[in-house]
Amino acid sequence: MWIVLTALVVIGLVVWEPGFWAESLAGATCGALAALALLQVGLLLGALLWQVRVSLVVVGVGGELRTWTTPRRRVVLRTVPVVMSVGLTSVRAPVRRRLWLTSLVSVLLTALVVAACWAFPPATAFGTGFAVAATAVVLHGLVPRRGAGTTSPGWFLFRLPFLTGRVVAEMEATPMVNEVSDALSAGDLDRAEEIAGRLVEAHPTLLAAIGSQVAVLTMRTRYADALHLVGTLVGRTDLDQRDMAFVMAEMASSTANAMEAGQLPLEVGMGAARRASEGAVQLGYPRYRCTATLAQLALLEQDTDLAIELAGQAKRSSESALGRADALATIARAQMAAGDNAAARRTLAEATELAGWMPRVAETSARLDVR
């Protein structure tokens, strides 16, 4: 929205006509949304050209109209299709070159459309607002920014080629990390563990390697071991704010899992989990990505209504089949705790279809069958 307002101020310094603000506001809003969508469409096109995997596509805002979930990709269509977001992950070397070229395609496509807006000068306040706002979106996107929630095209274009050290190694390790994720998505824990072991052996200090090992331990229900492994990262001095945000978020999740499984006392872990979750958000981790963990904590505190609400948010914002199945398992557990086993069975049906082998899904199903 600030882009739209900035565009209006710029236009206002140049043009003043009766009815200008309403018409130019509409144009600026449409221009900003169009440019944002074009950047994402450009990412899709670039990913196709340079063989970068598209792991997530979300079209629109609001409630879900339709979802298509596979082990490698999740596509979500929401009620108001005004924005779009795309998640990418490289599966082939050279990783940096492929990501750079993909981002270049995105920026060039959007810049060409914006240039066309100026090549044919807009004759109305709407057209002027559209062109100025679209230009502002492109310029804002070119500013190099990278956080726990998002990375700008400008970061890929102007910072990525000059990276050195661990950050580059983390990025170049993503093909093997994706192999672990693919094996976990398919329920092949032995293969996932074998690949994660090779990854840690080759890169023992990389967050990507350690994260893969944590994911395997979690799916093995070795939650206390996963928590201990995450805890070893807290004291590291080579991690920036973005890295530490991910570490704190994983610590909160591992703590919640360990408490739920009885591997950590509630009186020890509850405060630590909440502090870790809040710490992750303060460091830039998107709050909506914490809702799955917060739902587990609410359930452990026997607040079933809050657990269902938060897990519902986690389900709607999930970025993978495993994430959605995990959120559904939490909802089913909360419904069981509230005495509504029929609702729990309906909820668990989708979770079982997505990933019936997942420990939290399988354990919930077993408990439900006993009742």
Image (cartoon, rainbow, N blue to C red):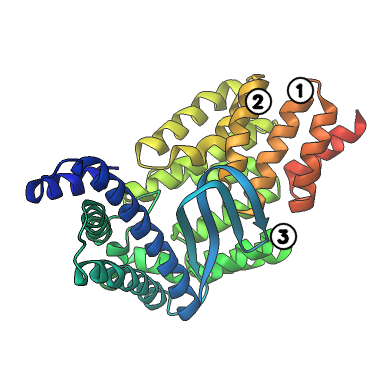
Q: Earlier in the sequence, mark 1 or mark 2?
A: 2
Q: Secondary structure at mark 1?
A: helix
What's the residue at 41%, 59% (across, down)?
A: 37
- Is residue 277 in sight in this rendering? yes
Mark 2 and mark 1 in contact (Cβ < 8 Å)? yes
Q: Secondary structure at mark 3?
A: helix
Q: Nearer the viewer, residue 45 or 279?
A: 45
Q: CA distance from mark 2 to mark 3?
A: 27 Å
What's the residue at 73%, 41% (across, down)?
A: 360
- The quadrant in which residue 199 appears is bottom right
Q: CA distance from mark 3 to mark 1?
A: 30 Å
Q: Nearer the viewer, residue 336 or 245?
A: 336
- The quadrant in which residue 68 appears is bottom right
Tell me the residue that label 1 is attached to: 337
Answer with left or right where residue 69 lies relative to residue 3. Answer: right
Q: Position of residue 34 (x, y in %)?
A: 37, 58
What's the residue at 45%, 34% (across, down)?
A: 276
Crowdedness of circle 1 by 10 Å Cα count: few (<14), some, many (20+)?
Answer: some
Q: Position of residue 21 (x, y in %)?
A: 21, 41
Q: Nearer the observer, disc 2 or disc 3?
A: 2
What's the residue at 42%, 62% (across, down)?
A: 40
Tell me the residue that label 3 is attached to: 189
Rendered image: mark on residue 267: none
At label 1, the amino acid type is Ala
